[in-house]
Image: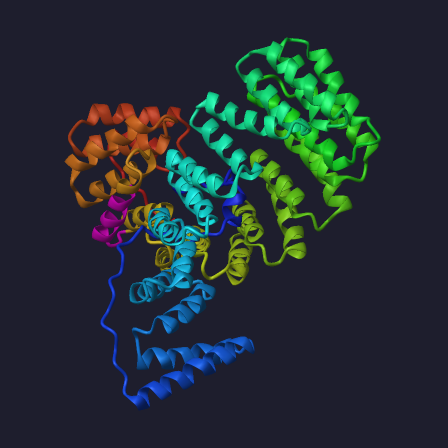
Amino acid sequence: MLKRILPYTFLLLSFLSITGAKGNDSIRVTATPKIVLTPTEQRKFDYFFYEGLKLKSARKYDAAFDAFSHCMAIDSTASSVLYELSNFYEQLNQPDRAVELLKRAVANSRDNFTYKIALAAITRDLGMYGEAAEEYEELVKENPGKPELNYYLAEVYTQQGEIEKAIQAYDALEESMGMNEAITMQKYKLYASIEQSEKAFDEIKKLADKFPSESRYQIIMGDLYLEKNDTVKAKSCYDKAHQIDPSNPYYVVAMANYYEQIGDKETAEEQIRSALVNPKLDVETKVGILSRYIMKLQQTQNGTESANALFQTLLEQHPNETKLNLMYGSLLQMQGKSDEAKFQFQLVTESEPENMEAWQQLLNSALKSEDIPEIIRICERCIELFPDSPQFYFYLGIGYYQQDNYQKALDAYEAGIKVIDPQNTGLLSDFYGQMGDIYYQMKDLEKAYKAYDEALKYNEKNVVVLNNYAYFLSVNGGDLKKAERMSGQCIKLEPDNATYLDTYAWIFFRQGNYTLAKFYIESAINKDGKKSAEIIEHYGDILYKTGEKEKALEQWKKAKELKSESTILDRKIEEQTYIEEDVSK
């Protein structure tokens, strides 16, 4: 029996994400002794270096890379060459090598601003926030005439969760540049994120005092009062905003929120509807108003159904705005109205076949309802429209697999592998893992194990592949020590997964270590909220081998009640003995 649960409900976004190299913060590189070149070596170095610069300027990057590499062979301590080569490695998507070279460049030229700012930027972009913070801190101290460095310092502090330090960096930036809306708004957001509402309010109040003719600051202050349930002061701020700018569309949202807060839902909806039918407002603004209103309904845990009629009003006014259909479809899906949501997405795919978002939403809907023919239809169409998008090959393979059309499923995965970015090793691993499962169902163990090996080559911690590979080795008389190692790794990665605990128990069972088998199968049962018939049957098998035959019979009967798909369970119960399943059939 295949132990892998096929990923019907995998989020499509998992295939669209780009896996960046987020290395751990590493130690600072120390300077290396400067190589002293002979005059001949220096002339040779200079020739290749300036030749490299000329070639790079002429966009002859391969030749430029070779020229700089020649320089590196002559003088591996030259910061200028280390810096140039780091740029190439960054473009080649080898960030670890780029960082290493930049660190060496900085170590050998501590006073060079260009090298240091480049190192700070790349470590920040790679998520090495601790090291980036160190670089920016040093840059800020060394370059008081460049206050903008505090902005980047504040950014990495924020990413680190060092909110107080981030605010201090913004304070320093504000002190040197003067009061600035962007800085003040960042401070406001940071104070709000650590629930220092009074300080957050003070930041907005400063803006409102400095820019009395700007209505949106009054609206933000009103929102803050509303969060505190101070509806009187909130209303006063909203009224001021309206006096300053009667045409501000977000005043309408603010007043709708206000009426929601005081329990007057009818007036709240009327406020929004009045904005949506306003011919002076463009569709982008109307979409923004409706989005903010829905967000507020969600935050206050009010039902979002009141927004449906507003969407319908907008759709009547702007029947060709597909973004409205997508938004409305997403809202309906969130409300559990799958068929109505599907209709909205279909409207988009019919009018804009190239709209991938609509197709993805349709596919999500089909996956949730486990509509296999629809999954196949959508994926085949999307492969025609978006041949370089691997997610559609993945789910097409699943669709064919569920129909037992194994060859077509394999064809889908093989075609998909050709369009996957070679750097996306996690996705390549998943594709090969799926192929391994299919080959196993086709009784081709050699190809199944080869596919699993390939999957683990790309991701040695692919826990689903590790589990399936280990289990299939155990039931087919394979290398049990290898199976034990892989299954043990699964337990380290996911110690509370009942399926993986069951596999581990079964491997010990096959090794004849019934004491450990019993320990892990009982752990699996404790973690199994769904009460798997397969786990229960295995428990019975293990109990039989430990001499607890009556208890074994009880578990076998329980597995039968749980609708076990085992072909030999009835015989076990009837003959009251353990019978080994013939997996070759």
Q: Nearer the viewer, residue 42 or 223?
A: 42
Which residue does the image show at 58% across and 30% down from the upper left?
Answer: 207
Please provide the residue range marked out in magenta: 477-490
The quadrant where residue 580 appears: top left
Count of picture labels: 0
Instruction: Relative to 229, say whether 194 is above or below.
Output: below
Dominant SS of magenta comes to: helix
Image location of residue 531, percent across then percent down: 36, 26
Which residue is outermost to the bottom?
40
The way the protein has been coloured in the rendering is rainbow
- Left or right of 430? Residue 536 is left
Magenta stretch: includes residue 484: yes
Magenta stretch: includes residue 339: no
Which residue does the image show at 48% across and 81% down from the upper left?
Answer: 63
Image location of residue 509, percent across then percent down: 21, 40
Q: Nearer the viewer, residue 318 or 526?
A: 318
